[in-house]
Image: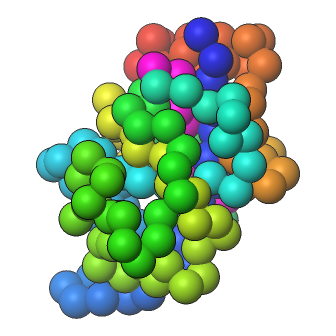
Amino acid sequence: MPAYAWNTNHRMWKVVAPFADSLAVLKAYITDHSAYVYWSTPRLHDEIAVGDVAYILCTVDHQGIVARGRVAEGPQLLNVRNASAFAHPARLTPPGWDEAIAPSSYKTGIAIEATFWDAPLHRGMRPAQGGVARLSEEEAARIEREIAAR
C-alpha cells in the first residue's frame, strides 16, 4: 500500500485564543475529535489515492511524525466557490490557518487513525522536498514497526 508523508510547520499557523502559541494551535487541529484534516498537497496529485497511508511530519521544534491516517479524499483544488465539494468543509479553514500562505491550493482529506503528538515517531525523518513525499516500502515498514512497538 502506498504511503506518503506531509510536512507541517507550526510557524505557519497564527496564534488564536485560547492557545498560547502556534504549536498548540496546530496540535488542536491535528488532535481534534473529528479525526479529520485537510493538508496542502503541492505535488503528486496524480499519485495520491483514497486509501493510501498518510503521515503528518512536524518539521520544526516538535519534530517527528505526529499523526497517521488514511487518505479519505484525493487531492483536489480548493477555490472560493467549491468548499462544499469537500466532505468536511469546516475543516478546510481551522482557527489559526491562513489559506493565503498555504503551500498549495490542492487539499487532501486525511482521516486520522492515531496521533503521536506527545511522543512523535521517527524523529530523524527528513522533511519531504516539496511538502509531500511518497515513502519507500522500507521506510513505511519501519514507521509501522515503531507504531506497533508502542
Whether residue 87 is visible to the viewer of this picture, yes or no, is: yes
- On screen, 36 above or below 21? above
- Residue 67 magenta-drawn? no
Quadrant of the snapshot with the C terminus: top left
Q: In this view, does 23 lie to the left or right of 29?
A: right
Taking the view exactly as shown, the residue that stands out farthest to the right is: 129
- Toward the left, the furthest residue is 33
Q: Give the residue at x 46% y 25%.
A: 50
The image quarter in which residue 30 lies: bottom left
Magenta span has 58? yes
x and y percentages locating residue 135 in the rendered image: 74, 26
Against 90, residue 58 (above or below) is above
Instruction: Tell me if 82 is positioned left or right of 146 in this view.
Output: left
In the rendered view of the protein, which quadrant contains the N terminus? Answer: top right
Pick whichever, 86 or 4, lies toward us.
Answer: 86
- Estimate the x, y position of residue 46 in percent, counting from the top left: 69, 34
Where is residue 20 shown, x and y percent of the image? 32, 86
Residue 136's image quarter?
top right
Determine whether, in the image, residue 8 is placed left or right of residue 95. Answer: right
Identity of the residue drawn at 74% across and 49% down: 43
Q: What stretch is highlighted in magenta?
A: 51-59
Main SS of the magenta segment? Answer: strand
19 or 112, nearer to the observer: 112
**Could you say where residue 16 lies in the image, as x and y percent from the top left?**
30, 88
Q: Which residue is drawn at 62% across and 24% down?
A: 3
The answer to whether 66 is drawn above or below residue 29 in the figure is: above
Can residue 21 be seen in the rendering of this structure?
A: no
Judged from this view, the residue extending furthest toward the front is 81
